[in-house]
């Protein structure tokens, strides 16, 4: 811990003064500015005044003076000359904070530097109250652009107040960039059908959020998916003619109407932002060149066809004064075309699994491209974030990005298959991302943990709540539970109770450890003082306990059925009755869990498309009803001495595909439509590893 003081992100340099010296805030302490300070500095002074009032109850009156440094019992904010000695080192966002027995002086080259210094002072006040230890902090970021991207297109659209709270959190962590990933969750007045039923963000929401971000030195960057990932839009009859191959995924580049539509959408969307940037996304266009644009792809090649679309988007965005950024995954399949991109296009290099090294960062750096690295929070496709994966992914990717010349980090927080995870579960990965991007990727994890416990969980360093984060994060990724980009902990919740795939594949020992880790976490998180965090985290733990016990019961039931003696015995019938009772108990727990899920959701988000997940609970209830009915019939037959189906050949679960099993079925639909040879190499490898390519051909 820097100087033994828990700050997050940790400052680049912190020098402690004598331990017996301190600055005491008193009722008559003042906050002093130079006489010529303008409205911006006064606004920052008011922010610090509010912080002192919140943390200590003291008023801290603001005044101006010809010489703010002349006098004692004061906090002083200065821009410019006072930090000149550190100017080249501090850059545009650095600051120097000196706490002396007579005064506290915060200086910075710019207002944003002062803002970040106030965040550090705010954390010091949280730890030490009105007795601030003497010290000198000299601090500046290692990465210029430090951002978070939140997915709001997988069912969950946060309320305006939730977004404001999130921006306050990110500002406290010294992030300066924020995006909302949007496919259909914005209200377009010319195309209102796109967002029907999803309680979308409105222009008023975005204008208010943009202003809120500006006041906290965060750039709100527009983000709208402009190629693939358009299943919602292309499922609507009025846009079906723009579907590349009938798979309801990519807009076809073969029709001019595609660009007319995008132009109309941009015209409504972009004016709500003050940023000159625009993320047009354009990732994972797996069906490109397989339908309407197939002839173009044969003439140009798929890579050049993709490039042509990007250039059209660049021209459209330029009409609204924007430069575009795009995900780099498709162009990295065609590295020879990267050099043909105009220099003003920013490439976003994304990888979400922990690796020893990220070669694409070096490749983009060697090509002279402006690029950012984009790790992930590892909090999607799981009931609890894959913490160790997130930590390694963030720190190593930032390390490799810095070595290759990356100018930014965009930490992505996705919500695949319904965004059923509370947003607050991403809090720790946000903190790790902030530490890596501001302080550097080599900050000891123990230092981050101690500061996180105190600053964000409001618990002591080394508290059990922090160990619970790591223990449960490991448990959801144990062998047979952990998978790339996901954890079977989530599938265990919704898996079919009698014939679910996980019954045969997940190690019962891993499930037992998962249940025990969630139980321990429940105990550790119950004392969290913040009621919203307490509800979110304890509910996540309860859900995991249920998922683990549910799958363990399914495994025990299947084993018991296989081992039933041919002739009925009293003990065998008792075993069947116990299995039925357990199934019934789990069935009874589903409605309370769904109700609590709804309450947790609605504390943070609009109702929007919550039905995506509530429908999964309902579908699981129906599967439990079918399972109970079938098992009761088998039990009665067995008790009567009649043969029964111990292999479940007469038990059927038609079309029950939870979570990514549904997504896999969608990919197989594309294979049937176009043939495996048309798919990108990475998708073919995935399907081959899953043993799903054999015998498939276009229909």
Image (cartoon, grey):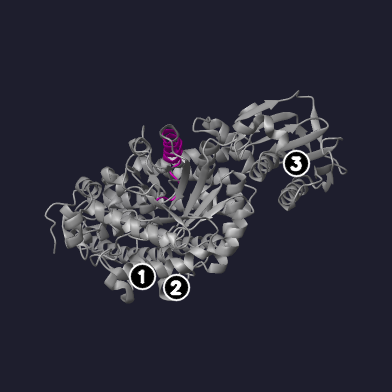
Residue 438 position within the rendered picture, expressed as x and y whole percent measured from the top left: 55, 37
Cα–Cα span, label 2 and label 1: 25 Å
Q: Nearer the viewer, residue 233 or 346?
A: 346
Q: Is residue 400 left or right of residue 443?
A: left
314 falls in the magenta region: no
Question: Over which residues does the magenta segment extend?
Answer: 381-401
Q: Earlier in the sequence, mark 3 or mark 1?
A: 3
The disc placed on residue 77 is 3
Q: Which residue is mark 2?
A: 197
Q: Quadrant of the C terminus?
A: bottom left
Q: Is residue 292 above or below residue 355?
A: below
Crowd band around label 2 with a 10 angstrom C-alpha radius: few (<14), some (14–19), many (20+): few
Task: Indicate the secondary structure of the residue bearing disc 3.
Answer: strand
Name the residue rendered at 55%, 39% in the picture: 466
Q: Which residue is mark 1?
A: 260
Q: Is residue 407 visible?
A: yes
Q: Nearer the viewer, residue 362 or 519?
A: 362
Q: Is residue 532 visible?
A: no
Q: Is residue 64 left or right of residue 665?
A: right
Mark in front: 2 vs 3: 3
Residue 275 position within the rendered picture, expressed as x and y whole percent measured from the top left: 53, 55
382 falls in the magenta region: yes
Farthest residue, direction top: 18
């Amino acid at each position: 811990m820097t100087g033994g003081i828990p700050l997050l992100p940790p400052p680049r340099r912190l020098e402690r003064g004598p331990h017996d010296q301190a600055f005491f805030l008193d009722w008559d302490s003042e906050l002093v500015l130079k006489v010529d300070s303008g409205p911006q500095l006064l606004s920052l002074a008011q922010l610090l005044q509010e912080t002192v009032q919140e943390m200590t109850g003291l008023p801290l009156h603001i005044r101006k003076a010809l010489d703010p440094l002349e006098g004692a019992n004061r906090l002083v904010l200065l821009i410019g000359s006072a930090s000149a000695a550190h100017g080249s080192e501090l850059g545009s966002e650095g600051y120097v904070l000196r706490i002396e027995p007579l005064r506290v002086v915060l200086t910075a080259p710019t207002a944003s530097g002062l803002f970040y210094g106030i965040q550090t002072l705010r954390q010091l006040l949280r730890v030490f109250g009105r007795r601030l230890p003497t010290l000198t902090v000299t601090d500046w970021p290692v990465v210029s652009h430090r951002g978070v991207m939140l997915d709001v297109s997988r069912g969950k659209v946060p309320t305006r107040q939730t977004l404001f709270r999130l921006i306050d959190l990110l500002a406290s962590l010294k992030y300066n960039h924020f995006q909302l990933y949007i496919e259909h969750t914005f209200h377009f007045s010319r195309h209102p059908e796109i967002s029907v039923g999803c309680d979308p963000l409105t222009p008023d929401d975005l204008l208010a959020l943009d202003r809120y971000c500006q006041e906290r030195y965060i750039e709100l960057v527009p983000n709208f998916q402009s190629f693939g990932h358009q299943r919602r839009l292309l499922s609507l009859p009025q846009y079906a003619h723009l579907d590349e191959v009938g798979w309801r995924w990519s807009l076809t580049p073969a029709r001019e109407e595609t660009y007319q539509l995008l132009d109309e959408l941009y015209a409504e969307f972009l004016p709500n932002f003050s940023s000159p940037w625009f993320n047009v996304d354009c990732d994972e266009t797996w069906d490109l060149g397989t339908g309407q644009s197939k002839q173009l792809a044969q003439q140009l090649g798929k890579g050049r066809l993709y490039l042509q679309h990007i250039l059209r988007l660049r021209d459209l965005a330029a009409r609204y004064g924007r430069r575009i950024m795009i995900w780099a995954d498709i162009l990295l399949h065609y590295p020879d075309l990267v050099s043909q991109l105009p220099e003003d296009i920013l490439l976003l290099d994304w990888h979400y699994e922990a690796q020893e090294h990220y070669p694409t960062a070096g490749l983009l750096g060697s090509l002279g491209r402006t690029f950012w690295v984009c790790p992930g929070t590892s909090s999607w496709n799981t009931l609890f974030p894959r913490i160790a994966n997130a930590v390694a992914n963030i720190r190593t990717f930032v390390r490799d990005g810095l070595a290759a010349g990356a100018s930014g980090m965009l930490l992505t927080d996705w919500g695949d298959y319904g965004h059923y995870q509370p947003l607050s579960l991403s809090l720790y990965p946000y903190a790790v991302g902030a530490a890596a991007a501001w302080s550097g990727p080599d900050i000891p994890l123990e230092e981050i943990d101690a500061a996180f416990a105190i600053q964000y969980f409001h618990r002591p360093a080394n508290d059990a709540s922090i160990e619970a984060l790591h223990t449960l994060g490991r448990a959801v990724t144990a062998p047979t539970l952990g998978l790339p980009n996901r954890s079977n902990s989530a599938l265990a919740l919704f898996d079919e109770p009698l014939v679910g795939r996980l019954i045969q594949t997940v190690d019962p020992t891993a499930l037992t450890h998962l249940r025990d880790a969630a139980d321990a976490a429940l105990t550790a998180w119950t004392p969290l003082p913040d009621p919203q965090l307490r509800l979110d985290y304890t509910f996540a733990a309860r859900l995991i306990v249920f998922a683990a016990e549910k799958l363990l019961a399914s495994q025990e039931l299947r084993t018991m059925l296989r081992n039933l003696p041919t002739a009925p015995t009293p003990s065998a019938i008792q075993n069947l009755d116990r299995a039925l009772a357990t199934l019934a108990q789990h069935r009874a727990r589903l409605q309370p869990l769904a109700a609590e899920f709804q309450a947790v959701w609605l504390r943070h988000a609009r109702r929007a498309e919550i039905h995506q997940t509530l429908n999964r609970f309902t579908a699981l209830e129906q599967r439990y009803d079918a399972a109970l009915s079938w098992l009761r019939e088998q039990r009665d037959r067995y008790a009567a001495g009649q043969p029964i189906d111990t292999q479940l050949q007469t038990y059927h679960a038609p079309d029950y595909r939870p979570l990514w099993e549904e997504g896999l079925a969608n990919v197989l639909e594309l294979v049937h439509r176009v043939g495996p040879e048309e798919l990108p190499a990475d998708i073919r490898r995935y399907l081959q590893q899953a043993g799903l390519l054999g015998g498939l051909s276009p229909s």
